[in-house]
Image (tube, helix red, strand yellow):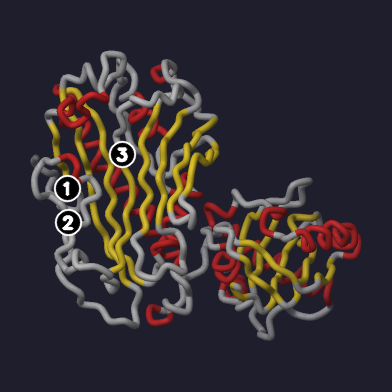
Amino acid sequence: MGSDGVEDVTIAINSSPNKHFASQVNASNGLATLGGGILCAKASMLLQNVPPALLVRFLREHRSEWADSNIDAYSAAALKSSPYSVPGSRAGGFSGSQVILPLAHTVEHEEFLEVIKLEGHGLTQEEAVLSRDMFLLQLCSGIDENAAGACAELVFAPIDESFADDAPLLPSGFRVIPLESRTDGSGGPNRTLDLASALEVGSTGTRTSGDSGTNSNLRSVLTIAFQFTFESHLRENVAAMARQYVRSVVASVQRVAMALAPSRLNSHVGPRPPPGTPEALTLARWICQSYRLHIGVDLFRADCEASESVLKLLWHHSDAIMCCSVKSLPVFTFANQAGLDMLETTLVALQDISLDKILDENGRKSFFTDYGQIIQQGYAYLPAGICLSSMGRPASYDRAIAWKVLNDEDSTHCIVFMFMNWSFM
């Protein structure tokens, strides 16, 4: 169909959805009474130095980084008899929590079938006909980083809370295919990357045009495809919404990919800049001043009074430095680049991670034993141990130090951890 002049998103139309779903469709769901069809919006992007398994694991476990609850609700409405009006897209607008309910997995754990429960949506009055909880049936594969050259994908479809066996599925999702790995005869340069080829609406799939990279770079192609039902009179509205949403997802994934790309592989493009907000500049100054106050030495061996220089040194420090709140259940509020790499997360998703989730049993015992000393004395040294990233990967560190950060009024603002000489195991 026609485009809006920007050819980054391809729109394909299936005007005969009943033929596609065959006997799955019955009169009790919205697909049977659909007076339009199914629309698929898809786009592809080149990824450099981002392991496919790592990216897909992040997309699976941090849906709030890219999903929009309005779009999720619209997709879920396709299972009802009366879908509501086309929503506007706002990337990262998922306002509830995500619960992963495992159903099955293969023997080697290379594939997972699970139900995703999306809780706590703030529904508008128009959306009140929907359950506050929504459910997705999700298939995830290729997230083993040791399986070199494997395709990784995350495919999901809204399902009714009844979990009926004959319910029709309208899948969407992500697929990442490494460009340098071709393990079978079908993996040539013209292998299709179209995740929604089952729509049978023509040869609109995105194809690779050849291997122009070198073995020194990890290169892969990510294909994003989202499917939506539409009624005939709303076809153009749904198409516009789908284009906007896929573009916002692409932008979100690009930010995530940049954050997940290991710094050792990104040295040719230079270090990533630190956040330049006034809050970050002030926090960096408080961290360094409090370290000097409690430990008696400077955190950095440099004479830099400017807050911009202090933040830059903190951000690019080789040790993982992380701030967490002073609460009964401490959560992280800030980390430098090494800290984000260690936790395999971004500054936005960092705030969903609590301290107890990254420490092993010995680390938790050591922290809670020394917590009183940190508050009273201002600092404590922690022994060598193991942390877990947000992806579940263990990272060892030689030793750590925790200190209390004071603000300009000498009140406790947060606690900082610095994990020294860390590395993934």
Look at the image and tell me whether residue 306 can be seen: no
User: Hey, which residue is sitting farthest front in the picture?
Assistant: 107
Q: Are dots 1 and 3 in contact, CB under 8 Å?
A: no
Using residue 182 as the reference point, say whether residue 415 is left or right of it. right
| Residue 253 rendering spot, x and y as whole percentages | 38, 55
Q: Classify 308 as above or below 223.
A: below
| Residue 268 rendering spot, x and y as whole percentages | 38, 82
Check disc 2 and report the residue beneath it: 206
The span from disc 3 to disc 2 (Cα, nearest Å) is 18 Å
Check disc 3 and report the residue beneath it: 171
Check disc 1 and report the residue beneath it: 10
Point out the tag, 3 or 2, that comes first from the N-terminus. 3
Look at the image and tell me whether residue 82 can be seen: yes
Graded by Cα atoms within 10 Å as few (under 14), some (14 to 19) or many (20 or more), the crowding at tag 2 reads some
Point out the tag, 2 or 1, that comes first from the N-terminus. 1
Q: Which of the pair 9/78 is nearer the observer? A: 78
Q: Are dots 2 and 1 in contact, CB under 8 Å?
A: yes
* Local SS, label 2: loop
Quarter of the figure that contains the C terminus: bottom right
Residue at x 23% of width, y 19% of height:
32
Q: Classify 234 as above or below 256.
A: above
Could you tell me the amino acid type at mark 3?
Answer: Pro
- Quarter of the image where one finds residue 172: top left
Residue at x 34% of width, y 54% of height:
251
The span from disc 1 to disc 3 (Cα, nearest Å) is 17 Å
Using residue 381 as the reference point, say whether residue 287 is left or right of it. left
Quarter of the figure that contains the N terminus: top left
* Local SS, label 1: strand
